[in-house]
Image: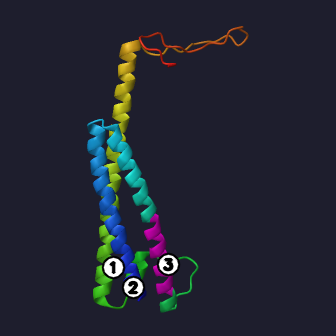
Amino acid sequence: MSYEKIAESLRLTSELYDQLIELSVQKKEAIIRNRMDDIMQLLARESRLLKRMAEAEKLRTEAVRQFQQQEGYLSREPMTLWVVSKLVSNPAQKTALQDGIRRLAEQAEQLRRLNETNQLLVQQALDFVDLTLDLLVGPSEEAVYHDPTAQTPYTNQRAGLYDFKA
């Protein structure tokens, strides 16, 4: 019975990873097209999926604990899925579990790469905005030295076309 719960938690986690991967691809397109409303909606959906992912992780942990108890392994810490897969005696179940673990590892790697790409795109967009501001209003000038006894404190203000206080 506990094997079925572990397999079900793996299936649920895999489905959630698929949804996160799809969201990351959509987020990449929204970032490229500078669609802030779409990005905000995608981030909200991503947050909900991450909450569901945490719930799936709790289910998996509990299923592994039940497996440990059922098989007579006494440990306070739950076993890793790979250790559980080695302890499963049914060859078909063992293979299915190991395939599920590999699939999760591949999905996690794909999601990591997509997130890195999205982070780079966001950083490039911020760099572009900073460059554009510098071209429009000039770079911010920083004091090389500021006299600490001066009556008026030094303020770093851009002289430019836009009122940044508004």
Which of the 4 quarters of the picture holds residue 153? Answer: top right
Numbered label attached to residue 97: 1
Q: Callout 2: few (<14), some (14-19), or many (20+) C-alpha neighbours within 10 Å?
A: some
Earlier along the polypeptide chain: callout 2 or callout 3? 2
User: What secondary structure is the magenta-colored segment mainly?
Assistant: helix
Q: Callout 1: few (<14), some (14-19), or many (20+) C-alpha neighbours within 10 Å?
A: many
Q: Nearer the viewer, residue 8 or 72?
A: 8
| Residue 86 in view here | no
Q: Are marks 2 and 3 in contact (CB under 8 Å)?
A: no
Residue 145: x percent and y percent? 61, 12
- State whether residue 44 is above or below residue 88: above
Q: Which residue is mark 2?
A: 3
User: What residue is at 29 percent from the left and 82 percent from the top?
Assistant: 95
- Foreground disc of the pair 1, 3: 3
User: Magenta residues, as a range?
Assistant: 54-68
Three-letter code, disc 3: Glu
- State whether residue 121 is above or below residue 99: above
Which of the 4 quarters of the picture holds residue 156? Answer: top right
As measured in the structure, the alpha-carbon distance from the residue carrying label 2 to the one carrying label 1 is 9 Å
Which of the 4 quarters of the picture holds residue 91? Answer: bottom left
Earlier along the polypeptide chain: callout 2 or callout 1? 2
- State whether residue 114 is above or below residue 90: above
- Numbered marks: total: 3
Three-letter code, disc 2: Tyr
Numbered label attached to residue 62: 3
Earlier along the polypeptide chain: callout 1 or callout 3? 3
Residue 90: x percent and y percent? 32, 91
Q: Are marks 2 and 1 in contact (CB under 8 Å)?
A: yes
Q: Callout 3: few (<14), some (14-19), or many (20+) C-alpha neighbours within 10 Å?
A: some
Q: Nearer the viewer, residue 153 or 46?
A: 46
Element at label 3: helix
Three-letter code, disc 1: Leu
